[in-house]
Image (cartoon, rainbow, N blue to C red):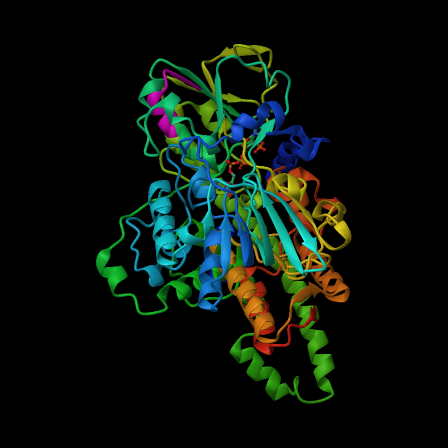
Amino acid sequence: MTSAAMRESDTRSFDPDALREKYRIERDKRIRADGNDQYVEVSGDFSHYVDDPYITPGLTRESITRDVEVVIIGGGFGGMLAAARLQEAGITDFTLIEKGGGFGGTWYWNRYPGASCDIEAYVYLPLLEETGFIPQQKYTNAEETLEYCEVLAQRYGLHEHALLQTQVKKVVWQESSRRWQVTTDRGDVLHARFVIHSNGPLNRPKLPGIKGIDQFKGHTFHTSRWDYAYTGGNTFGGLSQLSDKRVAVIGTGATAVQCVPHLAESAKALYVFQRTPSSIDVRNNQPTDPNWISQQPAGWQKRRQTNFESIMSGAPVKEDLVGDGWTEAFRNLFGSIGELMPSKARLAMWAVQGVFSSKRRERGLRQYLTDRAIQYMGLIQKMEMADFNKMEKVRARADELIADKLTAESLKPYYRQFCKRPCFHDEYLQSFNRDNVTLVDTDGQGVEAFTEKGVVFNGDEYEVDCIIFATGFEVGTDYSRRAGYSIAGVDGLTVSEKWQDGMATFHGLQARGFPNSFFFGPMQSGFTAAFTYALDENSIHAAYIIDQLNKRGVTRVEASEKAEAGWVKTVIQKARLTEDFQKACTPGYYNNEGHVQFQPQNTFYGGGPIEFFALMRKWRRKGKLKGLELRR
Ligand code: NDP
């Protein structure tokens, strides 16, 4: 934001102190001592919640025993990109293991009505130039995304490398052969030189661990396993079998925001149980202009992705190529960050002043850092004001679109925009104007209990035929629990043991004690809203390392103790920059359910994805594999 715009936004109609206090009150009423433990694991009596509704059960096949160069665990975008980048590096001996019946990962599972991506397709769908695929709209939907996954699978010949409907159970390091033994639920035993773990950060559904969760006698399912046999319809809606049904939805996160309008349209009665409202901004989907896309010069997608990620990181850019709610929000927040960057004119001035060339250099830099610190404090305040302004507009939108004033008030989010995942939707709020839809605002407390007949809040029982859990996915629980398989490294050390007191990795990708392994995930790595971008960068990095090891005759690679400790330190130092922000946030999976202070290393690389992946590129360019212990 320019200084003029900033001055303009300072002519405000809100009281910052009052808003700060309101945010604090709203956060405090949601902080719970049990944090992540408030949820139950979908195992044992609950394991049917993760059954695959999209396959015809009964597949049988012979189990497989073989040696392979690389095992990729997970057939989502991460696994597919890893396979693509390995092939580009000339590595074709790989097996991809996926528990679902097809490719797509999160998109394979999340086919609920209305499911779509609100990061624009030209950024989100990777390798568009390589495949020549043209998304129909700016924001793609679940059906098209799954179709695209199949396009990728065909393009890179993935079917012939894949074991679908197969769940990895154990991954064990065998020092004598310097290979990983990977066993599956179908009796397969693979001996792999390398393993890429791309099991998805949001793959394990969670349920609220509250009284009576196993008592309800009606129908239930989680949004990531939508039961169309019960509801009728498909991912575009038309849930005709709900016309005589009373339905409860638990949760109002990004998933609920997309499926509620379809449920509202079809169900006889819909009760939406809300603990914290999402922020719902304008989406404004548009068809792809064929002229525009056909005129894009080679390399356009990478440039667009970099432009998007730069804006999201607060890095200065000349123009906003994407121009949507995400980039607008970040331009708002980071608009003044350019003020912290040395401009060309300033650099020239320092050069004249001798800042870079004489004894005055140290004094000059000290002065610069002092200036920066002062500016930084100013910037923090400006960012807060920009955030207040934005959220005031989001709250005003609820007033504009919802007829009932009390309901509108309940749907207003009182927290900083990036405390939770921002949502963009043009029909969600209007759903609450319908006579068959009731918002049950639990004022931060959540539903109290389930009974045989329905859901209880504030002593009232809401009788329903069906309960749909839109309660999200495990984040921050034990890695193996989420992955669904155990990993035992050197001397039997498990990842659960290694990371019980917090994550420790080298570049978020490798971990000491787990040689020849790569972990794809956002922790200690570059996190992006367009997660496919990060997965692609991780894939390029892993493929580079494996290729280099092969060229150098290396059979064992492990992060050195020093390099790993150094990286953890860097992550913690960078994370501290956001610690206060996180602590002030309403609880959610972004801030470990409000328990921020305990493990600052369990976070993303705080410098942002552009800085992180530039660091990785530089590391590769040096070609020294610094920080890795290599054995031939
Ligand atoms: P979330 O974790 O974001 O939301 C879970 C919801 O369940 C929250 O509203 C939570 O409330 C609520 N909840 C939990 N326990 C209770 C309870 N006891 N009573 C009432 N409510 C409860 O999961 P989602 O599946 O919605 O989204 C997960 C992620 O998936 C998103 O953050 C996003 O990254 C991705 N996604 C992206 C989409 C897109 O591109 N548009 C669409 C869908 C998902 P509270 O907030 O108080 O914790």
Q: Is residue 108 in sight in this rendering?
A: yes
Q: Position of residue 632 (x, y in %)?
A: 68, 72
Image height of 124 relative to 281, above or below: below
Residue at position x 77%, y 63% in the image? 561
Q: Is 412 situated left or right of 553 in this image?
A: left
Total number of numbered discs in the rendering: 0
Q: Position of residue 494 (x, y in %)?
A: 72, 47
Residue closest to the eye, 433 or 237 = 237
Residue closest to the eye, 482 or 594 = 482
Q: Position of residue 600 (x, y in %)?
A: 71, 50
Residue at position x 62%, y 74% in the image? 553
Q: Is 554 situated left or right of 390 in this image?
A: right
In the image, is residue 268 part of the stretch drawn in magenta?
yes
Q: Main secondary structure of the magenta part?
A: helix
Write down the quadrant of residue 132 in the picture: bottom left
Range shown magenta: 261-270
Q: Position of residue 233 (x, y in %)?
A: 32, 27
Residue closest to the eye, 244 or 270 = 244
Image height of 618 relative to 432, above or below: below
In the image, is residue 317 part of the stretch drawn in magenta?
no
